[in-house]
Amino acid sequence: MSPNAVVSIVVPAYNRRGLIRQTLDSVRAQRYRPLELVVVDDGSTDGTADFVEEWSWSVAPDVRTILLRQANQGASAARNAGIEASTGDFLQFLDSDDLLAPDKLAVDLDLLAAHPAAPYTWCRTVQLGGSRRHHTYLGGPIRALPHDVPKHNWHISGLLVRSAAVKRSGGFATDCRRSGDWEFAARLKFRCGYGVFHPRVGSSYRIHQDEQLTKGPLNQYLDARERALLHIVRLIDELPSADLGGRAARDQLCLEMIRCALGYLRIGNLRAGTRCLSQAESIMPRGAPAERLHRLSKVALTKLFD
């Protein structure tokens, strides 16, 4: 790895003027250089872009900053715009209210230098202001097998990925506005394979009051989850039909789709719940462990209509 390898940090931002300063400061505090910061303002109306511009020349002239402005299209489209504008050898994705530990990039790059075949690395991520829940992946250096994909993923800020791997994966799906990072993780694992895990906490994220899953947002969350699952099904269809990993992945995806169905049913959305159960049936391999749960779910749905 070149000692002058550039890390591009892509930050999508929408109405984050009051929070993004801490995020930007955590970028500037990185031990590693050279850095390239790409902030994509996704149609903010609170002056977020103007704040970023002022910060870049008054606080962090040592960090090359690219500021893009676009109409509101969602985080996935903003990340794709940032990827397109970036010039770095590595990409770090960071939401506009997330924070990086000062040694995050330095440790990640050392790890990738020690594992030159690995297309990406990731670390633990902790939630601030509430539970100390960790996002992680079980074990140490692992092979990203297809059946792992539906069960395990990382918080997007925990990831550092080679730019070539991002291009190979195809970027973020713009029709998965709320689950785009999960769907991206699946494609990255399927198309690029191996990744390396480091057990330290390298980043943190915040949950805000307006992000709590009340009935309305929960409907939106489940819809995005459902879309992401269908994207991942298409990825599995790319595998050879005899691939046992693909079969195991289908079983896990079926379970996840059933969970979506039950989530819809709990909030009274019977039409969407029925749709998800039908999709689960189409995904499920015959004789799979999910088949029993699917039957029980259909019984529960029948009772709701009685």
Image (cartoon, rainbow, N blue to C red):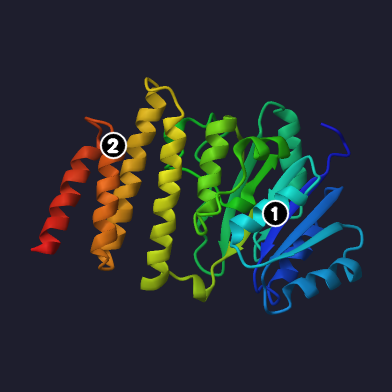
- Left or right, 262 with respect to 153, comes to left
**Residue 277 vs residue 94, the one in the foreground:** 277
Q: Quadrant of residue 195?
A: top right
Where 239 falls versus 130 (above or below)?
A: above
Image x and y of residue 173, in percent? 55, 49
- Left or right, 176 with respect to 10, comes to left
Quadrant of image for the C terminus: bottom left
Per the image, label 1 sits on a secondary structure element best described as helix
What residue sits 67% from the left and 38% below the top? 167
**Residue 169 vs residue 202, the one in the foreground:** 169
The disc placed on residue 81 is 1
- Left or right, 54 with respect to 247, comes to right
In the rendered image, the residue lying farthest to the left is 306
Q: Within 10 Å of the Cα at label 2, are there few (<14), some (14-19), or many (20+) other Cα atoms?
A: many
Per the model, the C-alpha gap separating discs 2 and 1 is 36 Å
In the rendered image, the residue lying farthest to the top is 242
Residue 199 in sight here: no
In the rendered image, the residue lying farthest to the front is 71
Per the image, label 2 sits on a secondary structure element best described as loop
Image x and y of residue 41, in percent? 71, 66
Of the numbered discs 2 and 1, the one sitting upstream in the chain is: 1
- Left or right, 68 with respect to 183, comes to right
Q: Within 10 Å of the Cα at label 1, are there few (<14), some (14-19), or many (20+) other Cα atoms?
A: many
What residue sits 77% from the left and 57% below the top? 38
Tell me the residue that label 2 is attached to.
284
Q: Amino acid at mark 1?
A: Ala
Q: Amino acid at mark 2?
A: Met
What residue sits 55% from the left and 43% below the top? 185
